[in-house]
Image (cartoon, coloured by chain):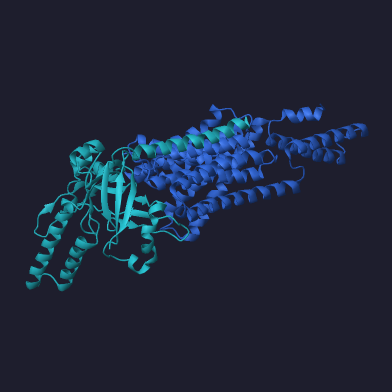
Chain colours: A blue, B cyan
Amino acid sequence: MTEERQQSKALVNRAEAQHRVDQILVFREELDRLERDGVIALPADQRQHLRSYHEETLATLTRDFDVDTTVTEKQMSLGMRIVSLLGSLALAASVFFFFYRIWGLISTPVQVLILIAAPLLAAAATEIVSRKEKVPYFTTLIGLIAFASFVLNLGMLGSIFGITPTQNALLVWGGFALALAYGYDLRILLVAGILCLLAFLSATTGTWCGMYWLSFGERPENFIPAGLLLFAVPALISHRRFQEFPGYYRMFGLLAVLLAILILSHWGRGSYLPWQPDRVETVYVILGFAASALVIWTGIHWKWQGITNLGSTFFVIQLYTKFFDWWWDWMPKYLFFLLLGLVAVLLLLVFQRMRTHLREAMA
Amino acid sequence: MRQFWMWTAIALIVATNAVVLAGVAYNRAGEPEALVIMTERELTVAYTVEENSGVELRLDWRQHRKWSSYPGDPGSAWFNQKKLEALGYDCSRPMSDPSARLEYEKALPRKAFAVLEYEGEAWRTWIAEAEKDRARIAAQIGRQEATQKDLKQADQELDRLRRTDSRLIAVDVGLDPAALRRQYPDRGRYIIAPAEVRLTIVEERTEKHGARDPAHLRGVISSILVNYINVPTELGNALDFIRQDRLLSSGPHEPRYQVTVKYGRRHEPWIEAIHPIK
C-alpha cells in the first residue's frame, strides 16, 4: 500500500479528508507567495517531489472521499447540499399529502400496512443509496423521507385509533433521526433528532412539575435543563468519528437555554418563580447578560467559534430588546436609533480591546 | 458500524409499532368501558380540506349552558375549589393574598378524567332552566322589563337545546377513572375520557338583587384529549350524503345520522357503526 493510501485510510471521515485537502491548498498558496517574495527558494527537485506528493494525496482523497479540491467545486457542493435539503423537504411534504389523499380510500389494515412499510422501506433505501455515493446528497434525501414517513406513521396511527397523545413519540422520533444521522453522517437528521429530544426532555420536565405535557411551552424554563443536557452530550459521549456533530449539540443546546432566558426577560408571568412578573423579568435580564457573556467566554476559551457568535448575538438582542422596552415609547426615534448605533460602536471597541489583549496573552 | 445504526433504526420502527398496536388491541379487548349511541348533535363531521380523503367526527361536548358563559356560571358549580384540590391543585391560600392570586393566575393545566353525561339529568336540568328563563322573560314583557327580542332569543335557546345542540355535558372530573366509573356505572350514558383541566379565578360579582358573590376559584375542562374520532373507511360511505350536501352542512339542523361509539380500557374511543336517521 502506498504512503498516500495509508494516510487516506488513517482519516476517519470526509470532514477530516476535506480539512486535509484545505490544508494542502492553503500550504501551496503560501509557498507560492513566499517564493515570489524571495523569502524561500526550494531546490527544483524538492519542489517537484513536494508537488508530486500533494497531487497523489489529493487524487487519493478525491477517490476515497469525493472531496472538493477547488473553490468552484466547493461552491457546487454547497449548491448541491442546498438542493438536496430543499428536495428532501419537498418529497417529505409529498409523502404526507399523498397519504392524506389516499387514506380515506383504503381499508384500515392497508392503511396500517402502508404506514409501517413506508419508513422501513425508506430506511432500507437509505442504506442502499449510501453504498453508491461517497457524499450523502441522495442519502440525505432518502433519509429525510424515512424520517418524515416515521413521523407520519405514528401520527396517523394515533389519529386512526384515537390514541391519547404522549411525549414518548418525540423520544422515538428523535432516536430514529439520530440513528440515521450517525449511521450515514447526515447533519439535517442530526438537527431533527436534537430538536425532537429537546422537545421530549422539555415536555418531560414539565410533567415532573405537574403540568400536562402538551402545555410545556407555557413555561420556557422547561427548555433550560434540556438545553444544558444536550450541550453536555459531546463531553459525555466521544465523537471522534463525527467531529462536526458536537458543534450542533452545543449550538442547539445553548440556543434553547438563551432563547428561554430571553423570552422570560420579557414575559415574567411565564416563569415557575413565585414572584411578581416585573421582578422575574429583572432577574432574567441579568441572567441573560451573564449567560451571554459566559457563552462568549466559553466559545473563546474552547475555540468554538459558532458558540462565541451565538453568545454575542444574544447579548446584543438582549440589550436592544431592553432598550426598546425602556425607551421606545418616550424617546424621539432618531435619538433611540442613534443610541443603538453608539452602543454598537462601544461594543466594537470593547471586543477590539479584548481581541488585542488575547493576542498579547498568546504571544 | 453503519449496519448497527441501520438495524437500530429498523428495530425502532418495528418495536414502536408493535407497542402502539398492542396498546390498541388492549384498549379494544374485552367489554368496552363505555358504549354510547349518539347523533350528529354530539359527533359532527370535522372540517377538512379537499386534499384529505379521510373523515373524522368531532366530539361536541359542553360544560356551560350558555355559549357566552363564563367559568362562574352556576351550571358548572360542581367544578369548585374542593374538586380542584382533589385534582392536585393547592388552593389553600386565600384569594385576598396578592401572591396567592398570582399563583392561581399562573396555575398550569393538568391531566385528569372527565365524566361526560349523554342525554341525562344535566341536559334535562338545562332545558328546565331555559324554560324557566323563557317564562320569566315572557312575564317581564308585560311589565316592560324585557323586549320581544329577548323573548325570541330565549325561544331560540330553548329550541336549540331541545333539537340541535349537543346533549353531551361534562358533569364531573377526577384522577381515578375506576373510581369515577364506580360513581357513574351506567356505561351507556356516561363516558369517562382523558381531559385537560385548568384552574380559573371567578372575579367578584354583584348580583342584580344586590348580593355579592366574592371572588373564588373554579375549574374548567379546557379540552378532551381525544376530541376527533376517525371514521373507518369501511363506514365512511354512510356519511357520503353529508359531504355532498354542503348547504345543509352549515348552521344548526336536526341530526342526520346516529353513531355508535365505544371507549376501551385506555379510555380511547372508536366508532363501531354509523346509521343515517330517516
Is any atom of residue B104 visible in this view? Answer: no
Quadrant including the C terminus of chain A: top right
Nearer to us in this view, A163 or B186: B186
Asked if residue B62 is positioned above or below residue A203 in the image, the reply reads below
Nearer to us in this view, A305 or A216: A216
Is any atom of residue A11 visible in this view? Answer: yes
At which x and y percent is residue B102?
A: 27, 44
The residue depicted at 39 percent of the width and 36 percent of the height is A205
Nearer to us in this view, A174 or B128: B128
* Residue B69 left/right relative to A316: left
At which x and y percent is residue B116?
A: 24, 48
Quadrant including the N terminus of chain A: top right
Residue B254: quadrant of the picture: bottom left
At which x and y percent is residue B100?
A: 24, 41
At which x and y percent is residue A309?
A: 57, 42
The residue depicted at 20 percent of the width and 60 percent of the height is B161
Asked if residue B238 is positioned above or below residue A296 in the image, the reply reads below
